[in-house]
Image (cartoon, rainbow, N blue to C red):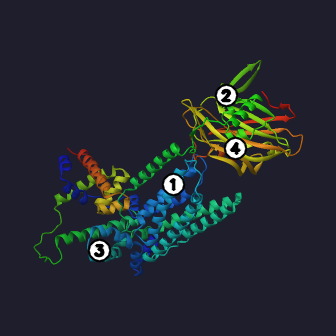
Amino acid sequence: MEEELLELLRARDSRGADVLLLHYGPLMRYIISPILADPRDREECLSEVVLRVWERSDQFDPQRGSWNAWLTALTRNTALNRARHNRRFPAGAEVDELTPSPAPTPEEALLRQERAEEVRRAVSALSKGEQALFYRKYYYLQSTAQIAAELGLSPRAVEGRLYRLRAHLRKALGGDGHG
Amino acid sequence: MDKQDWTSLEEPVFDELLLENAPDTPPDDLISQITPWRKAVNRVLWGCALTALTLNFLLLNYLLPAIGVVLMLLGFRTLRRENRWFRLCYALAALRCALTGYSLIRNTTVFPAAPWEQALGVINLLLLLAVFFALWRGLCTLRETSGLEFSTGSAAALLVWYGILFVLAMLGAVGFLAVIAIVVAYVLILRNLFRLSGVLDEAGYAIQAAPVRLSDRWVVRIFAVILAVGIALGYLFGGSYPMDWAEQNTDTTAEVQEIKDHLASLGFPEDILNDLTDADLLSCAGAKQVVVDVMDHPANRGRRVTEQQGNSFYSDTVYDTKELRITGIAVELPDERESWKIIQHFQWLENPGFYGTESIQLWPASRTDEGWGMRGDFTGQVLYDENGKTYISPYFYLGEETYTSSSVFWGSTQNQDLFAAFSLPDRGENHRGYVSYTIQEMVDGYIVDAWINYTHQMTWWQYPVRSAMETRMVNARNDTGTFLTIQDALQFYPHDGITDLINAE
């Protein structure tokens, strides 16, 4: 299915969008839903993702990761950008040209890169179960209720696991390469 | 950002930093795990696989299906909000879980099965068929709502497979080739179902996992605790028959006393006379002669002793104690046609620690010899002494049983035997009892050949729990493991006034 879809997208065949929505629509909605609360926002975001996939499918390199991973990252980033945009410019708010740019300074960018690397190292040192929990919480931004339902846990049990996860991460981030 | 910064951050700030700095993409193996569907469906499929497995060793034929029903319950619990068919699957899986749990606990008791309990196996299978039907319909509904094209044939095939298996089981004749075909078909169906699960991953993201109040781990724990407590109670209170013990009434009528005195004068053991009911004593009025044969038997496995004689070694089992005394008594009755009242009495000389059930299987002379016929009913009772008092109880079961037994040598055979089933208490001493019946001469010249097979339960541990009587009926050669059978026979040539014991010690 993946190869057929990529062929259609790269050939700029309009059926590609239909196939993408049919087969990967549920995955994209699954990623968008926890990030965007408003149903209209979600649908607009989904359209935006389809458009981006349509435009950028050439950038997908199977050597660097799976199609699902690429699509997941693209969908998540699109949804996060939309969510950030919504926070900065709530519906009805006027945007003037004096609004400062959200782009970080070079120093901030370097610091952010270092932090991201530290977090990546700390997360990769976690157990598989904790890693999955981390990604659900901090990557997919799933609510405690959603995590609980999908893992067959009570919300309280999820809170307990998240508490332990944070403690592990604090320890790992505080102890490795710092001080 | 230094070390202090990470460890001393307020929780919301720490959360925000993790969110901002999460890796760009999760690892591929994690991406496939993060779905509301796969874990639940895999549980359902593994549950299906384990439910059908029948590995008759290490209790796996009980453990694996039990794990299977719990997995199916947990899987359908997650999917129950998706559509009404999955909801039905969940309800049926919960019912199957309860029934399986009940069966597992019930297996630790010897109480006779109620009529509805006898149908439990069929009910469970019908429920399983209903689960597969609902699973198939649930997948069809999912196909409609997702718009994806996939075949639900493997789920329907599972339903058909179980249906065929059910019919074959009812017919009772499944050859080796049929078994191979059944297993291969099942493996293929499951393989297709697991493939289907992969195909459905795309649609699975649309599923809304149902929230739960109790985590899966707690559901499993609660099920395990209920099973453990139920099984412990079953072994504790259900491993022996409820006997109707009452203090023996020592009052006796002059007529009965007169018969007792007469029988004692003919050589009837006096202590056994006191164990007989008045009805049995009255039936011996006017007895002409009494034949007695006493034999002590070991009710233990003994110990192996090896002796060297010259260059040869001889190994033998030596029994240091003989705990069970069996006394065969024949009383010739004053009837026109030669008739004997046979009394087979047992007495525990040492308390072996009664763990559950005991049984007596009788092979009267009439069983094999056409020279004798049965007359009247079987009678008897069990007794024990405690604090100077004697307690009596009727047998839990005393009567004739028709059963099919299997043997390596004779294959499957239909039998009809007399059985007494009972339990003896751990308390007290001098546990004993007897069974009696009357035989009447049909053809002159036959010996009296009356057998008793006493089956004693050696240990409480067995699963599923079977009574001594059931075990004896299923397999007569049960001298290893939980039960031990002790055989004894009263054999003599009846002549007028003289009897020759055949097997006297």
Q: CA distance from mark 4 to mark 3?
A: 84 Å
- Residue beneath the point at 12% across and 72% down: A99
Q: Earlier in the sequence, mark 4 or mark 2?
A: 2
* B238 vs A109, nearest the viewer: B238
Image quarter where the C terminus of chain B lies is top right
Marks 1/4 same chain: yes
Q: What amino acid does circle 2 point to? A: Lys
* B67 vs A49, nearest the viewer: B67
Residue placed under numbered mark 1 in the picture:
B102
| Residue B486 visible in rendering | no
Q: Tell me the subunit letter for badge 4.
A: B
Q: Earlier in the sequence, mark 2 or mark 1?
A: 1
Numbered mark located on residue A42 in the image: 3
Marks 2/3 same chain: no
Residue placed under numbered mark 4 in the picture:
B379
Q: What amino acid does circle 4 point to? A: Thr
Residue placed under numbered mark 2 in the picture:
B322
Labels 4, 3: front one: 4
